[in-house]
Amino acid sequence: AGRAGVCGSDRSAEVRLPVGRRSAGGRGGGQRDGSMAEDDDFEAPMEPTMIPGNLDVVKQYCQNPTNGRLEWIQAEIRKNNLNKGSDITDEMEDYLDNMDMNPMDEPGMVIHKTLGGKGDNFWNIFAEGKTFDRDVYDNDVLSQVYHGVNDSNGFATVTVRFKFKNPETTKPFKLAYRVELPNGDIIENDLLNA
């Protein structure tokens, strides 16, 4: 598996890009699981459900109508969202228990509460497997977005596409994500979730 490349900016934080991806002033490197994210990885797989108003940082999501699994979300994080989220509720933990969770899985938030993510919405939680690299995800999404938004008047867009081994499973085996930072840098990555 290749290492993610580093894209420069005027901050000391690193921005990772897979091979062939570009951002303002940067160059791409390999992905952590050796695969490449395709452009369609970040497209909604069906007509997304829009979340009205400014009630949530998640603005739209796709849920499979057959088995209820979450397949895609898109969030917009602004400075006024920072540190305004909430923990995962008992009801959402119960919701995940009815999915394909393994005994070692933990409830995970797609958009962390520090970025304004809410733990009482099914569209912001997933069964986080023991192989999911939370440190990489938190650096790419939580840290980069928090500092990028906090240090600017702009916003960041986070798009996550959940990948499944077959049409019946409800636990994703992989998350493909794309982060568009206020300064124009883009982070794309795939992480395994077994």
Image (cartoon, rainbow, N blue to C red):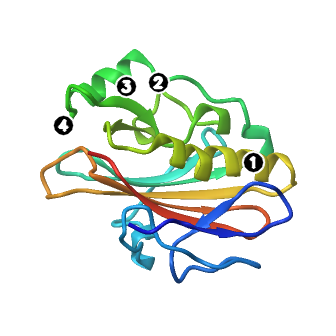
The secondary element bearing badge 1 is classed as: loop
**Residue reaching furthest to the bottom:** 20
Quadrant of the snapshot with the C terminus: top left
The image quadrant of residue 103 is: top left
- Of circles 4 and 3, the one toward us is 4
Q: Nearer the viewer, residue 100 or 58?
A: 100
Residue beneath the point at 22% across and 33% down: 101
Residue beneath the point at 37% across and 29% down: 107
Q: Which residue is mark 3?
A: 92
Give yes or no for contact between labels 2 and 3 (Cβ–Cβ under 8 Å): yes
> Which badge, 1 or 3, is on the more N-terminal residue?
1
* Left or right side of 136 for 129: left
- Of circles 1 and 4, the one toward us is 4
Instruction: Indicate which disc residue 100 carries.
Output: 4
Amino acid type assigned to the residue bearing label 1 in the image: Arg
Amino acid type assigned to the residue bearing label 3 in the image: Met
Q: Nearer the viewer, residue 168 or 1?
A: 1
The secondary element bearing badge 3 is classed as: helix
> Which badge, 2 or 4, is on the more N-terminal residue?
2
Position of 19 relative to 142 (above/below): below
Tag count:
4
> Which badge, 4 or 3, is on the more N-terminal residue?
3
Residue beneath the point at 43% across and 45% down: 133
Position of 129 relative to 3 (above/below): above
Q: Which residue is mark 1?
A: 78
Label 1 neighbour load within 10 Å: few <14, some 14-19, many 20+: many
Tell me how far mark 2 sits from mark 3, CA to CA.
6 Å
Q: Which residue is mark 2?
A: 88
Indicate the position of residue 154 as horizontal and vertical percent values: 81, 57
Q: Nearer the viewer, residue 64 or 11?
A: 11
